[in-house]
């Protein structure tokens, strides 16, 4: 079928389109690349495996849509509604999803490298094993999202709300999370090598065995954090708050804790041989 025929079928509405997809489940090569749609309600549409590369969708509703395995690289979906949509294994590299609603969406295994997700809503979304290298998520809201095993190396997440998010085994090396909220989050075994975590709120979070080598935690809030076995070698923790944090068995060699507040922190078994505690508030029991 030619692209014009696909568009004509699409304009007949979601029900007609989905019935056609059901009647031709093995249909391949649906090419809607660079299509331009505006003001349509495509809620629940089946666009799985469809080529939408470079498409421009303005003011389009696609909540609960099936976009599994779709090709959406370099598409412009700014402000689009994709709540509860299935975008698993989709190619979303270099896509614009700024201000989009992706809450409760399934993005597991998707390729979002270089994507623009500024101010996007991703509450309770599943981004496990997603590729988000060098993507921009500044100002996004991802409360309770699942980001297990995802790759966010060199991603930008400044001033984002990531409270309650699960980053276990994710790669956040060299990522910028400055001024973000990660309160009560899970970062077990997370790679944060060289990450910028200035003025971040990690209070009550679990960073067991996290790798924070060379990370910048200046003025960060890690009160009540679990940092058992974490690696903070060479990290900048100056003026940070570690009140009541558990740093037992952590490696703090060459870490800088100047003027940090470490009252009530647990350092049992920690490696502090070359740690700088100048001007820091230390726990009563050392």
Image: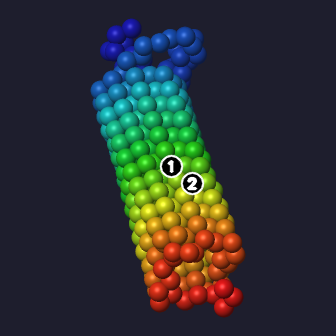
Task: Classify mark 2: residues with Cα within 10 Å, few (<14), some (14-19) or many (20+).
Answer: many
Q: Which residue is mark 1?
A: 171
Q: Which residue is mark 2?
A: 190
Seen at 33% across and 23% down, the residue is: 33
- Indicate whether 111 appears above or below 221: above
Q: Residue at x 47, y 40 (%)?
A: 131
Quadrant of residue 222 within the rendered picture: bottom right
SS at mark 2? Answer: loop
Residue 218 screen position, x and y as percent:
43, 74
Q: Nearer the viewer, residue 180 or 260?
A: 260
Instruction: Name the foreground residue: 153 vs 87.
Output: 153
Front residue of this view, candidates 253 and 239? 253
- Marks 1 and 2: in contact by CB < 8 Å? yes
Quadrant in which the C terminus is drawn: bottom right
Relative depth, front residue between 267 and 95: 267
Residue at disc 1, secondary structure: loop
Q: Quadrant of residue 205?
A: bottom right
Q: Is residue 236 visible?
A: yes
Label 1 Cα neighbours within 10 Å, binned few <14 / some 14-19 / many ≥20: many
* Residue 103 seen by the camera: no
Is 130 placed left or right of 7 in the picture?
right
Residue 245, image quadrant = bottom right
Of the residues under marks 2 and 1, which one precedes in the sequence?
1
Q: Residue at x 49, y 57 (%)?
A: 192
Could you say where residue 284 lies in the image, as x and y percent from the top left? 66, 91
């Amino acid at each position: 079928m030619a692209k014009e025929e696909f568009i004509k079928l699409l304009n007949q509405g979601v029900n007609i389109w989905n019935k056609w997809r059901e009647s031709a489940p093995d249909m391949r090569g649906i090419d809607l690349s660079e299509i331009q749609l505006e003001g349509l309600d495509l809620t629940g549409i089946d666009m799985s495996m469809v080529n939408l590369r470079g498409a421009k969708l303005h003011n389009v509703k696609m909540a609960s849509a099936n976009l599994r395995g779709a090709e959406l690289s370099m598409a412009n979906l700014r402000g689009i509604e994709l709540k509860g949509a299935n975008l698993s294994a989709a190619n979303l590299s270099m896509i614009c999803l700024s201000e989009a609603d992706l809450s409760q969406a399934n993005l597991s295994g998707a390729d979002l490298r270089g994507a623009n997700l500024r101010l996007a809503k991703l509450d309770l979304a599943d981004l496990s094993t997603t590729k988000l290298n060098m993507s921009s998520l500044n100002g996004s809201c991802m409360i309770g999202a699942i980001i297990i095993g995802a790759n966010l190396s060199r991603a930008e997440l400044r001033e984002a709300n990531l409270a309650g998010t699960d980053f276990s085994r994710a790669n956040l090396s060299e990522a910028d999370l400055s001024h973000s909220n990660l309160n009560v989050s899970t970062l077990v075994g997370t790679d944060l090598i060289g990450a910028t975590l200035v003025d971040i709120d990690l209070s009550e979070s679990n960073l067991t065995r996290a790798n924070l080598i060379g990370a910048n935690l200046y003025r960060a809030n890690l009160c009540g954090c679990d940092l058992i076995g974490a690696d903070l070698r060479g990290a900048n923790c100056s003026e940070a708050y570690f009140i009541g944090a558990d740093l037992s068995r952590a490696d703090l060699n060459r870490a800088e804790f100047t003027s940090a507040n470490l009252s009530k922190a647990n350092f049992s078994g920690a490696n502090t041989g070359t740690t700088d505690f100048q001007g820091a508030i230390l726990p009563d029991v050392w």
